[in-house]
């Protein structure tokens, strides 16, 4: 009997300890972060002040019952609902100090780890990402799978924008980036963790989505290209599309051949890339093989698409893609002078790392050859 009493006492004690630890405040009593923005302000002496806006979800009670978690009961969907979002902003001379300033003007505790997106202003990206990335990774609560993007203007302005049907503009932008891989040969590697890896990898240069506000809408307009930790250029989407084809291991997008307003073909294709690297007489050579495979989704160029037309189209599209790629490579080597394609990673892996080589210079001086193979799978519904 005495043993049973002791066991029961221990069970009650352990249960009470854990129940105390597992208590969670209601959603409407916490500032749940949707997105983190990074802005900077420079004075005439080049002193920098950081401005860090947080997009916070606003929750409101709707009556009896509840939705969410309280300290002792589960709740139903009628009591609390997600309505919209608002901004909490803080300014300071360092990123860490902004946390102090922010809490002084916030009436609730702030959660970290729920954010969907990191938005970096163009000025902050040009100034450099090292301070931003270092403080994010020093916080164990931060979600390293958060997506990241660069925006034109201030991050605060794009986070403040209201998008119909979305609780915050961050939710809308996150969806744009996450599902952008269906077209334009975009990657899915735009998470905070990938930024950290890219900044610490030899021969690799970071690219991030570039977003703009146009006519009170948010638009994906290009790719932000970095040299080291600092943004160097913004590539327009047409150039970014070609860069993505050459840069990523695989991708998906639409390519077109057009000979007039009513004469065109749209080709919805997957591409796989292979890279071979050699070194001859001290000069690097790269062979990039692009293998396209996809469907014709619109055709007003050929009245009757037969086997001979297929071969004709495949050759025509192959030559067009090669020209697009060579034009981009010429600009990359002579204007940007940055290894946009991370070809330095292949050379470093084959010929040795940590040798002090400037891979941007070596790739800009290298011989780069592109070969393209195009194949049609289907010609449309009912055609195989």
Image: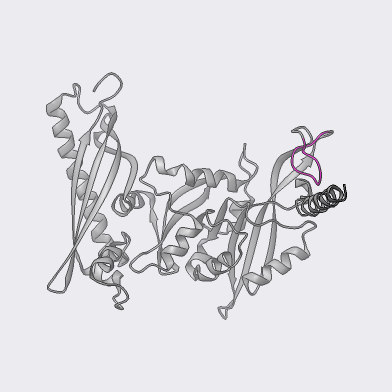
Observer able to see residue 215? no
Question: Residue 11: where, in percent of width, then height?
Answer: 80, 49
- Placement of 188 over or under 79, stated as above or below: below
For the rendered model, the colour scheme is: one colour
* Residue 237: image location, x then y, percent: 38, 49
Residue 71 is inside the magenta segment:
yes
User: What number of labels is visible?
Assistant: 0
User: Where residue 296 sits in the image (x, y, percent)?
Assistant: 27, 30
Q: Which residues are magenta?
A: 65-75
Q: Is residue 209 magenta?
A: no
Give above or below for 34 relative to 306.
below
* Quadrant in which the C terminus appears: top left
Side (left or right) of 134 relative to 20: left
Query: Which residue is painted at 65% across and 59% down in the image?
Result: 53
Q: Is residue 192 above or below residue 127?
A: above
Identity of the residue furthest to the top in this view: 382
Q: Image check: 259 left or right of 281?
A: right
Q: Residue at x 48, y 67 (%)?
A: 126
Q: Toward which corner of the image does residue 73 lie, by quadrant?
A: top right
The one nearer the camera, 303 or 375, is 375
Q: Residue at x 54, y 69 (%)?
A: 134
Q: Give the vertical position of 35 relative to 139 (above or below).
A: above
Prevalent SS, magenta region: loop
Tell me if residue 146 can be seen.
Answer: yes
Q: Position of residue 112 (x, y in %)?
A: 65, 57
Specify the farthest residue to the bottom. Answer: 45
Front-lying residue, 48 or 197: 197
């Amino acid at each position: 009997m005495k043993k049973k009493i002791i066991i029961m006492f221990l069970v009650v004690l352990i249960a009470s300890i854990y129940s105390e630890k597992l208590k969670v405040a209601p959603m409407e009593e916490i500032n749940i972060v949707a997105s983190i923005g990074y802005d900077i302000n420079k004075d005439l002496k080049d002193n920098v002040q950081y401005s860090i806006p947080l997009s916070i979800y606003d929750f409101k009670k709707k009556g009896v019952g509840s939705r969410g978690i309280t300290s002792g009961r589960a709740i139903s969907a009628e009591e609390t609902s997600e309505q919209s979002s608002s901004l909490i902003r803080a300014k300071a001379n360092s990123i860490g100090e902004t946390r102090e300033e922010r809490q002084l003007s916030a009436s609730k505790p702030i959660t970290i780890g729920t954010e969907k997106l990191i938005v970096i202003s163009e000025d902050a990206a040009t100034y450099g990402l090292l301070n931003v990335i270092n403080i994010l990774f020093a916080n164990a609560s931060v979600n390293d799978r958060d997506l990241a993007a660069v925006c034109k203007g201030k991050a605060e302005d794009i986070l403040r924008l209201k998008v119909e049907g979305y609780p915050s503009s961050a939710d809308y932008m996150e969806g744009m980036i996450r599902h952008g891989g269906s077209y334009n040969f975009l990657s899915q590697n735009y998470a905070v963790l990938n930024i950290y890896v890219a900044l610490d990898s030899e021969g690799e240069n970071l690219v991030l989505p570039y977003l703009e506000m146009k006519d009170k809408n948010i638009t994906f307009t290009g790719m932000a290209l970095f040299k080291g930790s600092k943004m160097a250029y913004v590539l327009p989407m047409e150039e970014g599309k070609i860069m993505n084809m050459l840069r990523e291991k695989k991708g998906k997008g639409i390519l077109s051949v057009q000979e007039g307003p009513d004469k065109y073909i749209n080709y919805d294709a997957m591409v796989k890339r292979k890279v071979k690297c050699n070194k001859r007489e001290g000069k690097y050579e790269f062979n990039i093989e692009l293998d396209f495979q996809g469907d014709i989704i619109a055709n007003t160029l050929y009245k009757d698409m037969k086997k001979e037309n297929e071969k004709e189209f495949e050759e025509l599209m192959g030559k067009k893609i090669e020209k697009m790629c060579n034009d981009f490579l010429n600009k990359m080597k002579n204007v940007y002078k940055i290894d946009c394609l991370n070809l330095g990673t292949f050379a470093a892996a084959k010929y040795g790392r940590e040798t002090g080589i400037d891979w941007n210079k070596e790739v800009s001086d290298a011989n780069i050859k592109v070969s393209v193979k195009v194949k049609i799978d289907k010609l449309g519904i009912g055609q195989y």
